[in-house]
Image: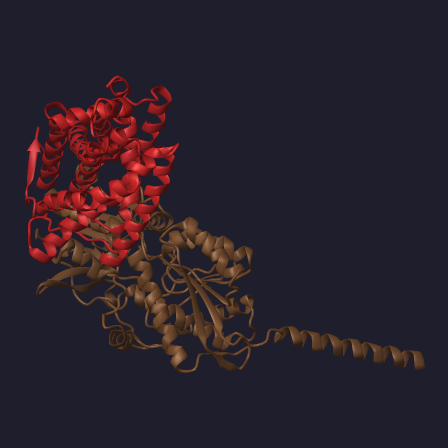
Chain colours: A brown, B red
Amino acid sequence: MAKSKSRIAAACVAGAAMSALAAGSAGAATAPAVLKIGTLYASSGSFAVASEGQYQGLQFWAAGVNKAGGVFVKAFDKKIPVKIIAYDDQSSTATATTLYNQLITQDKVNLLVADFGSVLTSVAVPLAAEHHMLLIDPTGSGANFFTKKTHYLADVSIPASTVWPIPLGDYLLKQKIKRVAVLYGSNDFDASQANTLKAVLAKGGVKPVYFHGVPTSESNYTVLLHTIAARRPDVVIELGYPPNDIAFLRALSGSGLHFNMTFTIFPGQLLALLTKNVGAKTLAYTYTYPTPPLVKFSHVTSGLNTDDFVKTYTAAKHEAPNFLNAAGYNTGVIMQDMLKTAPQFTQISFDRALLGMSGKTKTLLGAFKMTDHGAQLGELLPVAQLVPQGKGNKIVVVYPKAKATGKAVYPAPKT
Amino acid sequence: MVGLLEYAVIGGILYGLFFSLIGIGLNLIFGVMRIINLAHGQFIMLGGFGAYLLSRDLGLNPLFGIPLAIAGAIVIGYPLYYAVVPRLQKSHDPEMLSFILFFGIAQIIEALAVFGFGADQRSLPGDALGAGNLGVLGQEFPDSWWVAVLVSVLAIGGLYGYFARTKLGYATRAIMADRDEARATGINVDRVSAIAFVMGLALAGAAGVFVPYLLGSVSPDIGTGLTTTSFAIIIIGSLGNPLGTVVGGLVFGLGTMLMQTFYASWSNLVPYVLLVVIVLIRPSGLLGKAVRHA
């Protein structure tokens, strides 16, 4: 009996010890004095404009939360100020690889945020997984990132590029446009959009009359446009990065060629940059995917709504924000909610918190819906046309019908 | 199909002639000084920004960027030459050292350009060089292409005139053939080389004026890519031989445009495949003999 009692006592002690250990591991880490958020930006190179915009948006968010005493971290039940540790990757994936590694292994950041776009994010995805860090991915939307279930990737501010062209494809089918030419950059971001578009069109029995990739660094489109024109398309869709869009639209303007509909991506994200380089007249009647703040979301569950963001950002920075500024800010807002709900201060807990927020969170960029592959499905990007207004152009959303603010001018008149 | 082929061939010739201008400054400097100006593309970029500033701030036609490029080359080129090149020439391996030194200069220029102009793309008014199209054999190209080609041909022709008809040109050719022998015959090698260095930078700057028209826009980061392409062109033609640059430019232009027309995804691979093939078959370049016996 005595033996049995002592066994029970020993079991109780062991159980208590295990419970204590378990509790210890749940709140094992002591609360840091500051929350280190590591990220990269590009001050030069092809992605500089977009990358700096995204970084400025993140800085704007950080300044706002620090003014309020920091972010609330549920795991420690207290507010903690944030500190952004950022390095310049100069738009180089090689440099970015080294710097992401430095953020993880040397700076030991608490949260890792990727640089702009799929190219500069691509090198961070395997690194983050290797080090068991959740990569907060603001705008890297390449389809190849999201092929399997993972705890270490969360696309937060832009839908996966595979879903971008779905409304565009539907629109072309609804308009009964049969002759479609698609010219895309040979990178994950553009190629995955091109392939989705091709698949959507195929469902409606439309096969593109021209479907070719070009190097991401392509800068001369004159001969390409002539080759496309020989196929007599009604619609020409160019999927590229900002320098591609600028070169394409300028070449189109100078070529004397005219198509009934022309679509490019970045007028909907960096309208001021495109207008400065291409001119409002050349941009007139071009179609694009409009993004906030060109389209607005008033009802939000987290952070500022689109209008308030525009006002606050403009007051703070003395310039109107673009989509990349909004994407950077949104990344901060999503991380803030994640920290507010994650019960433990671990990367897996952060990922689970994001999945828990999915479908329930609305921000200035619309609905936040994340899959367990880390892909963002949130707001599908509508189709819009730039219509002349005064000396510039205004955005008219033409599809889907529920979001439409006007009707498309089709075929586009010669400007 | 024939129409597409014609368009690609004519486009390739025009594009190639423009790229001859892009590359010729690099080849001139190498031919005369045996140094590799890795900042060549950055000087092209500065030419583009010069034209942009003249157009935006003074409302001038971008073509005024050409005299500005010449003036800029004089102001930057002479001090840079005397600060750097004579010392490089005294070293045991000027080619390799110039490679490293000009790489540093390229990085400095690019960083300064970002500070000065920002990282984003800049363009020139689309109609400043003509808003229409001109045709040959029924194939039309934008006016700006023709203006760029005309300036390229004039610049390259002028360079030949300089080599063939002026005393300084003869002296330059003598230095290209043998620097020490030229010095022994009483040629002021440093003075002639400095002029060639300035001319190389001026040609690069002048080419930069047309970059926004043929390559869409100018931004601080375009320099490295342009230097690489220039290298491919001058090696295809022949290092140190300006005529080789024209041949290299034409091969590059035709190859790129034919691939854009018939297999677009591979278009930027062409110059480098050609480079490898030509280096393997004819290491001195297509016009290699000319330089060896100059």
Q: Nearer the viewer, residue A371 or A11?
A: A11
Residue A140 versus residue A84 in the image, above or below: above
Q: Residue at x 20, y 54 (%)?
A: A175
Q: Position of residue A23 (x, y in %)?
A: 66, 77
Residue A89 seen in this snapshot: yes
Q: Position of residue B265 (x, y in %)?
A: 31, 38
Residue B264 falls in image quadrant:
top left
Q: Position of residue B137 (x, y in %)?
A: 8, 28
Residue B95 falls in image quadrant:
top left
Q: Nearer the viewer, residue A354 or A129?
A: A129
Residue A150 versus residue B251 in the image, above or below: below
Q: Residue at x 17, y 27 (%)?
A: B2
Q: Nearer the viewer, residue B109 or B191?
A: B191
Horizontally, residue A366 falls left or right of residue A22, namely left
Horizontally, residue A115 falls left or right of residue A106, namely left
Q: Residue at x 36, y 52 (%)?
A: A91
Residue A269 falls in image quadrant:
bottom left
Report the label total: 0
Q: Residue at x 76, y 76 (%)?
A: A15
Q: Position of residue B115 (x, y in %)?
A: 27, 58
Residue B196 versus residue A58 in the image, above or below: above
Horizontally, residue A407 falls left or right of residue A42, namely left
Rendered-image quadrant of the N terminus of chain A: bottom right
Residue B175 versus residue B214 in the image, above or below: above
Residue A257 seen in this snapshot: no
Q: Nearer the viewer, residue B161 or B233?
A: B161
Horizontally, residue A145 falls left or right of residue B182, namely right
